[in-house]
Image (spheres, rainbow, N blue to C red):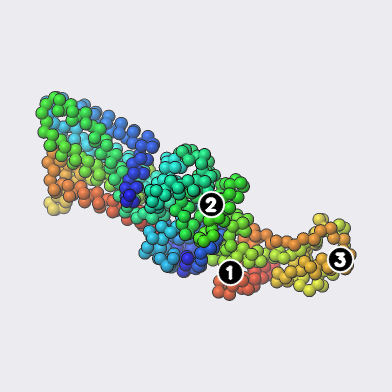
Amino acid sequence: MSATSIIFKREFVSFFATPVAYVFIAIFLIMSGIFTFMMGNFFERGQADLLPFFNFHPWLYLFLVPAIAMRTWSEERKSGSIEFLMTLPLSTAQIMAGKFLAAWAVLALCLLLTFPLWITVSYLGQPDHGIILAAYLGSWLMSGAFLAVGMCMSALTKNQVIAFILAIVMCFLLVLSGTNIVLDAFQTWVSIGVLDTIASLSFLTHYDAMAKGIISANDVVYYVLSILVWLSAGYLAIESKKAS
Amino acid sequence: MISVNKLNKFFDRHHAVKDLSFKIERGDVVGFLGPNGAGKSTTMKMLTGFLSLSSGQVLVSNLDIEKSRLAVQRKMGYLPEGAPAYADMTVYEFLYFIAKVRKIERSNRQQSIDNVVAQVDLQEVLNKPIETLSKGFKRRVGLAQAILHDPEILILDEPTDGLDPNQKHQVRKLIQNLAKDKIVIISTHIMEEVTAVCNRVIIIANGEMKFDGTPESLRQQSKWHNAVTLSLSYAADVSGVLELEGVADLNYDKNTGRVTVFPENGANILAKLSQFCQQTKLPVDAIYPEQGNLEDVFRLVTSAEYTFNADLGSSANSSATNASTEEEKA
């Protein structure tokens, strides 16, 4: 078994050894229900799609993903287990990948468990299943980007609360950078090019099309790159702690 | 073989480890001593690849720790200070996880786990979560994790800390059994542990090398080494003792009636002294040689004035001892 999959398995099981995963999944499902039915007007819209459900995902992830990401490195550092983990014959990249994939798998599980919504909408009308499937994949990909940000913040500190708050702030900036609130602030004094760059960094901008079931290479590349960049930043944070 | 050459570690401005150099051969059981904050754990963390080196070189079986970290770590077992583990796992799950990481073949895994469980006596807690275990058991889980893959090199940071005397004895016996053809490095505060298991002692203080030699040569640093104590049944004139060849000084405690005779340069004066007592019919109840208190030597060696010269060997040590005692007198 490869090193990454050993770490993956341990991390994944440990989510369920403590109440973390159960609480997380329960809250995720409750919140996504509230967002979809109460705020998204799922029934009133009279359309056989899951757009209200997917539209709220960035905001759901904003708070929930940092909660699951905050423990990944902070807890290891706090309990000292990082010392024996990093002295096992495993590379930091393998550990990072294993941890990321484990938490990402929990997020996948959360999404899978929202299947009653899909059943409901199929029962009520004839939705385009391809669109829904694409939107699920898009949402999962975006959750990976949130997760990578959260893990990077977790790698910076041994305090889980600080990791949580840093991750929320960072994710919030990344979500907001595509909205008018942020763009208006820059509009007056930066060039259009810069403005476009800021907007294009947003999780939201790239998610819009995906929520509607359109998966473009552009968006996929953006999220994959985001994940890689933030995981690399986390990797560097872990490696630099070796020197200090 | 471990070869450490001019090892340095800086934490920002703090110079935690200063120019440490030593070589450890197969079969050595090294007691790594020093006051708290001396840099013991930092050095161990660098040897195991957890911390990077600020400068210098660590070679393990001719592999550079910086360049071939994973290859070195495969040869090593390490018990970090405080024996951290994954608290949410049971002992068995944890050891199984380590067995997988250590690439122990599936067919041998169960056997390896059974072996270490028997060696460190974990049978009764095998299926309990580690977080519910007592300190002693946690420490033994840490030990089990370190020796699971039968490593060539075993690095144990305070392996007996928090254990009761029975458990300490058990762990020392375990280390002695393991040590035969391995390198074992143990950090500890406990001097008796050094004499119990080690055949070599390295003492550092403030990140500097203070002593490197056998436990016996460490003992020889003591003023009390080979000193002889006479217990007198009533007060008598013992000044004649000073005339004997090889006697440097004596200390007469009138309250207890004990006379401690210090030899010159650690010479053996017991025989001469007992002969002298018989000849002069001194009222001696008991006569016994002193061992030299390692705790005293530890304090002496780790004092700021003491300098260790590795090149000159043990003769330099004794002159350094004299120099520092003279300073104390002054």
Query: Dot 1 corresponds to which residue?
Result: B307
Could you tell me residue B4's position as x and y percent?
47, 67
Query: Dot 2 corresponds to which residue?
Result: B159
Q: Please, is residue B100 above or below residue B291 in the view?
A: above
Query: Dot 3 corresponds to which residue?
Result: B278
- Please name which of the two marks, 1 or 3, marks the residue nearer to the observer: 3
Q: Residue at x 70, y 69 (%)?
A: B266
Q: Earlier in the sequence, mark 3 or mark 2?
A: 2
Residue A46 location, quadrant: top left
> As shown in the figure, which amino acid type bears the numbered disc 2?
Pro
Q: Secondary structure at mark 2?
A: loop
Q: Respond whether the residues carrying marks 3 and 2 are from the same subunit.
A: yes
Q: Secondary structure at mark 1?
A: loop
Could you tell me residue B287's position as x and y percent?
80, 61
Q: Secondary structure at mark 3?
A: helix
In space, the residues marked 3 and 2 are separated at their CA atoms by 49 Å
Q: Residue at x 11, y 31 (%)?
A: A127
> As shown in the figure, which amino acid type bears the numbered disc 3?
Gln
Q: Earlier in the sequence, mark 2 or mark 1?
A: 2
Label 1 close to label 3 by CB (< 8 Å): no
